[in-house]
Image (cartoon, rainbow, N blue to C red):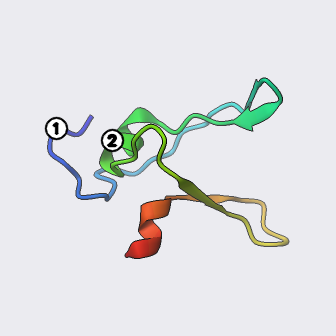
Amino acid sequence: MSQATAGGKLQENVTEIVKLQDNNGCNQVTIPADAVEDLEIEKGDGVLVIGNEGDRELIIKPSSALLD
């Protein structure tokens, strides 16, 4: 875990398999805690999910990244 603030950037590569969970009919995944801390995401913050037609991946960014 990072001790110093990351300034909104990852301090280490992130590769982790997480499970899709059903929470009262809403699908959710858990973002690893170290990544959340480094990216300075807090409870209630918006997260942008991007998926392009034909791709087999999603990109997840803090919505604050739109301001950069």
Is 8 located above or below residue 21 in the figure?
below
Q: Left of 48 or right of it: where is 58?
A: right
Q: Left of 3 or right of it: where is 38?
A: right
- Residue drawn at x 61%, y 36% is 17
- Residue drawn at x 62%, y 34% is 18
Give coordinates of residue 16: x percent, y percent. 54, 39
- Residue drawn at x 43%, y 67% is 65
| Residue sitting nearer the eye, 1 or 37 | 37
Farthest-out residue, bottom: 68
Quadrant for the N terminus, please: top left
Q: Which residue is mark 2?
A: 37
Quadrant for the C terminus, please: bottom left
Q: How many marks?
A: 2
Classify mark 2: residues with Cα within 10 Å, few (<14), some (14-19) or many (20+): many
Is 36 located above or below residue 22 in the figure?
below
Please, what secondary structure does the residue beneath circle 1 have?
loop
Give coordinates of residue 13: x percent, y percent. 39, 51
Q: Amino acid at mark 1?
A: Gln
| Residue sitting nearer the eye, 28 or 10 | 28
- Residue drawn at x 40%, y 47% is 41
Give coordinates of residue 60: x percent, y percent. 57, 57
Q: Left of 25 or right of it: where is 29?
A: left
Is 47 located above or below residue 68 in the figure?
above
Farthest-out residue, left: 4
Q: Which mark is residue 14?
A: none
Q: CA distance from mark 1 to mark 2?
A: 9 Å
Give coordinates of residue 5: x percent, y percent. 19, 48
Q: Which mark is residue 3?
A: 1
Is 49 located above or below residue 25 in the figure?
below
| Residue sitting nearer the eye, 22 or 1 | 22
Please, what secondary structure does the residue beneath circle 2 have?
helix
Q: Amino acid at mark 2?
A: Glu
